[in-house]
Amino acid sequence: MLVLVSMTDYQPSQQLLQKTDTFPATCPNCASILFSAMSKVFQSLSLFGILIGAVGITTSALADEGMWLFNAPPLQRLKEKYQFDPSPQWLEHLQKASVRFNSGGSGSFVSPNGLVITNHHVGADTLQKMGSAEHNYLRDGFYAKTQAEEIKSTDLELNVLMSIEDVTARVTGAVKPGMKSDQASAARNAAIAAIEKESKDKTGLRSDVVTLYQGGAYHLYRYKRYDDVRLVFAPEQQMAFFGGDPDNFEYPRYDLDICLFRVYENGQPAKIEHFLRFNPNGPNDRELIFVSGSPGKTDRQLTLDEMTDMRDRYLPYVLNMFYRREVLESAYSERSFENARKAREDLFGDQNNRKRYDGYLAGLLDPQIWSTLEARERKLRDAIAHDSKFKSALSAYDRIKRAQAEIVKNAPVYNYLEQERPVTVGYRAPRAFAGNLFKYARVLLRAADERTKPNGERLPTFRDSARESLELELFSDEPIYDDYEILRLTDSLTDFTSAFGPDNPVVKKVLAGKSPHARAVELVSGTKLKDAAVRKDLYGKDAAALQSAHDPMIDLARMIDAQARQARKTYSAQDEIKKQAYADIAKARFSVEGASSYPDATFTLRLSYGTVRGYEQDGEQIPAFTDFAGLYQRVAEHDNRPPFDLPKRWLDKKSNLNLATKYDFVSDADIIGGNSGSPVVNKANEFVGIIFDGNIQSLAADCVYTDTQARAVSVDSAAIIEALRKVYDAQPLVDELTGAR
Amino acid sequence: MLVLVSMTDYQPSQQLLQKTDTFPATCPNCASILFSAMSKVFQSLSLFGILIGAVGITTSALADEGMWLFNAPPLQRLKEKYQFDPSPQWLEHLQKASVRFNSGGSGSFVSPNGLVITNHHVGADTLQKMGSAEHNYLRDGFYAKTQAEEIKSTDLELNVLMSIEDVTARVTGAVKPGMKSDQASAARNAAIAAIEKESKDKTGLRSDVVTLYQGGAYHLYRYKRYDDVRLVFAPEQQMAFFGGDPDNFEYPRYDLDICLFRVYENGQPAKIEHFLRFNPNGPNDRELIFVSGSPGKTDRQLTLDEMTDMRDRYLPYVLNMFYRREVLESAYSERSFENARKAREDLFGDQNNRKRYDGYLAGLLDPQIWSTLEARERKLRDAIAHDSKFKSALSAYDRIKRAQAEIVKNAPVYNYLEQERPVTVGYRAPRAFAGNLFKYARVLLRAADERTKPNGERLPTFRDSARESLELELFSDEPIYDDYEILRLTDSLTDFTSAFGPDNPVVKKVLAGKSPHARAVELVSGTKLKDAAVRKDLYGKDAAALQSAHDPMIDLARMIDAQARQARKTYSAQDEIKKQAYADIAKARFSVEGASSYPDATFTLRLSYGTVRGYEQDGEQIPAFTDFAGLYQRVAEHDNRPPFDLPKRWLDKKSNLNLATKYDFVSDADIIGGNSGSPVVNKANEFVGIIFDGNIQSLAADCVYTDTQARAVSVDSAAIIEALRKVYDAQPLVDELTGAR
């Protein structure tokens, strides 16, 4: 399955922006407006100049590459290759029918009554949290026959993109010449906070400033926010993730990776204007399709120096972390069914990350891919070198290299004490303190401190604009399991001790003279933060009151807070240097390559397109589609044993099914983690499928698009209807989807 | 399960010795002969001075600590605590009934017709190698109803210790004052090789020089060698390893971890004089028992500096390696049943190592254990400091520290190119080149080179005395699976590339411009070494002929051989410095502590003793015994799902069984990896059980013995008889064991 991204990963931090005229993405002539807006910043802009193969490798002449902004869609390319010319209304409809999940994925409205479809693995975190020892919704699935039976989720937030405003001029103008990097960063932060607040106050919409082109452009995105989200339908996890880790990122595939929610407003199903009509037949082979979703993060415009660090330091670092966690969670899971239930989501997530980063590393170690990256940069640098007005862009490469070297030096303390990965912000525990309890402790501690500062100077997580999301997370009634918390904390404390040595002063302070296990037992047993009511109570308190509460987990968070914040400060300062340097490069790139390129993914809404088509692998032709017959065949090959086993009803109801029904399919649309749950639509803007994975060859998509073998994997809309009707007896749901009622 | 050790791990390398009078361990007055022999080396020897609690922590006044030499048994302790006084004949009988498996474990003769019992997990490697896609002996078990049905194993070597000779004087005399460490090492190597050869030529017995007390004493061990070993009985792996990784190193436990072989001579079952009579009733609670086996390696006499390196560098290093492999092998195994069969032994081995080293690290991070280690060293160093004749011992600590620092500096190249762990010698692939094929390639390459040298100057693996073992390994017809070899080699090449960086010259040379995967495919597809006949043929060739064979795997081994050998040389030189320093400390220790202590484990025969008894854990009393009723209860709790599932016949035959039959039991005998399969005997020298594991609390036993909770886990002889008779219908085998026929 695609990697989910946490909303907090992409909170618009450390950016600044300048309010300009509203610039709705859905305006009739948005492309030309974009032209005019961007030309203020970038000289020599040639919006429709096509750059073929600039990013791709071994792609066809006009490859289906790109994660395009909705306010700069690839109209020319679509016209040229597919003779298709989507209208502004077509684009607005798809944009507003698309939904972003704060748990890290994508989805879409599929009925006028607030029905939202996404992947099971996007909903899984919620299913897990809703579950208990008695009700294992994650494993057993769920179906609410009536609206009254729909279950409210504990902490889901859904966002629908309502408008995009270009604020680049204000942002780039906020950094004055001669400012040091920390001054620039502070100025930028303050400006961003102010503008988000202004927008929120004015429109009532969630307002995020998004950095595009690594700092080449800044757009303000406004979202309608839904937080009353109820579970309608989920299949058994076995069906959604049939084949488990072995089949993950593989194709052919046989997964029903879907989950249906309904958004409510004022206690009633929300009335939705823009929803996708459900086509019960799926797409055809070789058909043009579109994907609308929020790809999380790509690295296609990183410098070669940064890619080198990615390949040689960062990926091995995260892989070791995921290996370690996977082993810990597997071993724990095998001890009992209940353990397996408790750890299931973490385990799947870590396995998924491991496989995904493993594939990414394999891509970067492929000399062919690497030399493509080298050639790409060489071409750009050569062009820059020949134009004296891009002098600053030339030095930008060195500035990035030096800044990254500082980030690397700072990385151990940053990763273990502040956050385990650079992109993660906010709620995730740093590597030394795994589990939910430390995470809560830190939020409480920092909320008390940050509240006393002006909004613009706070850490992004604690700004007024993020308050609702923060509280949703903090007050979640997700169950906490002492044994599992102790297990994870013991392991991460051990890992921390090994990384820094038991004689390191911070390690000694943290362990307080105890073994990692004894310390974890003490902390987990002693803290009161397992109770959401206690967290709610403490959240209101100031720093002094918090201190006098003497909660051991908060005390631990306080103990290391100075070091952790210092590491963050160091990181942010260097990151700011990189931002400015990337902005310089971006300007040069626009000039050299033309502006027809799309920005790296930022977990904001993008439009991809492509063709439904199979591929060749080891001399064998892999067809685009699988079907139900193939599913049952695969089950038989594995004696119906996990992870290739079927729930009983799928065995019982086999004869009901039309086994020729198409199940999953592949296309060459350009996607990445975060696109999970993205609707696949046809030219008629009808829902024909749902993205849930990429194949193994697609895992280098972080840095390069290819279409020889790399494919996006979707569930076919035909399979969804067939399964709902004939296996799950969910005719009312089918009727709602197909508009029969 | 206890960690197995490879025979090659403990090949007596880099040691020297001096031939003295033959000193059979089984002579009637061996203790006093030992006294006289050792007193030549160590002044102030006080053999029977009891040192209570010198090594142990929180042990009872006279703890059942120690892995005692058969030529220096703890007679006084046994007399004092248990009023038991084993005769020399008693000791000789147990010694000669004990068997060492070259696959890394222990065992014993249990019939006059060559029947040998060991653990299933000791035999597992052999069961795996015997298996095929059609016959999965490892999974399904095996029983030869007649001798004709017994299957010859592919490469098992069994050793029975026939005599021990103290050669310390010759060894310590061989290093002349003023020799540099590499000279000393070479002189020592040459002397060892000569003495082993002399002994082999004279007696025809396998002759190994063993370093005891980290260089404080050298003994020549002579073994009768059996290499026609046939499989008689194995239960299903499910039964032997019931509970799998989750229950591994845990208690209570329900495992039938046994395997029976028969040794043949000249095509007939060997006639065995010293075998253990099988007591069908097992031991009683609180009974005195003895364990005779070959504990692999302990670190109880390492300096605190070395223990610090163990805790802070080495254990995290190996744990990361095992995490990585466990994930790789698990993911591969889950793809199909056949994959699972192929990888099963590697996976179990890596999981076992991971759990074991994890427990060891947890022990070292326990401040109570660590301060015990500190106190132990401080006491010894203080005593040494007050006696001027131990001046050299005082400086020894610094010499060890400096030498270890050099070993650490050399470790990356040594581990990745020469051998993955310092103690491993010979046949195991280094970390960069996982799998069987590189291992064979290196043996062939080095055999050709080493053969041209005088015997005494060769690497230990290639000495005349080791030739039979080497060829047994090299000509093994263990099946090789291309896909699995490619998987492992791809991963280890990736790991190597990440560790050294893709621009490292050796990495570039090794990868030859390809990705790790492409290179692994090329090497595995191209090599002819999968065929044992090819290996046999190439083994006869000289270096030039080998070169002109142009086998890609041998070419790879040649390509990195100079670097690898240099790393070995550096390691050996520093190891020699450590040896000399430890010898100095050992002399002082004898003087200060008395010689009643036992040497660290060296995978040579040792005698342990103890009491069958339960323990308290988290306020709960864990009884010493489990029974069959408990097994079925545990199965029910887990719905008979893996790894808590039973083979069908165990479900069918439940009603046959006396469910009150004792199954597994714990004792406080002092054991460690390598003791797997050791017989447990009572005062009458009867077989009452078989060691197969330690509990989780025993995992710090590497560095410290404790008896509060740490326990050795055994299968009860009563369970063996009950299962063979009533589940496996193996009455003839029962009759042979109980002497009924």
Image (tube, coloured by chain):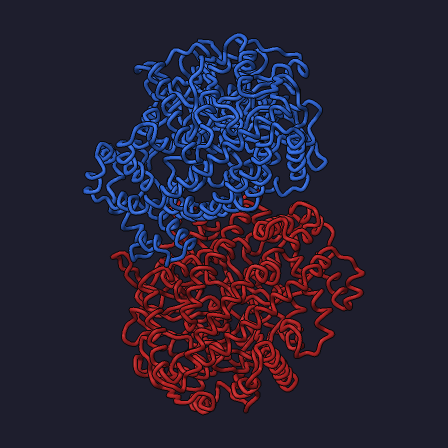
Chain colours: A blue, B red
Residue found farthest to the front: A178
Q: Nearer the viewer, residue A166 or B553?
A: A166
Q: Nearer the viewer, residue A67 or B420?
A: A67
Q: Nearer the viewer, residue B171 or B22?
A: B171
Q: Position of residue B421 (x, y in %)?
A: 54, 63
Residue B411 lies in quadrant: bottom right
Q: Position of residue B588 (x, y in %)?
A: 40, 82
Q: Position of residue A401 (x, y in %)?
A: 55, 41
Vertical side of B272 occupied by A719: above or below: above
Q: Nearer the viewer, residue B674 or B375?
A: B375
Q: Position of residue A655 (x, y in %)?
A: 54, 25
- Which residue is drawn at the image coordinates 72% and 36% (left, top)? A619
Let me know if residue A614 appears in the view. Answer: yes
Q: Is residue A564 left or right of residue A724?
A: left
Residue B723 lies in quadrant: bottom left
- Which residue is drawn at the image coordinates 66% and 84% (left, top)? B201
Let me know if residue B134 appears in the view. Answer: no
- Which residue is drawn at the image coordinates 47% and 83% (left, top)? B92
Vertical side of B591 occupied by B257: above or below: above
Vertical side of A16 occupied by A510: above or below: below
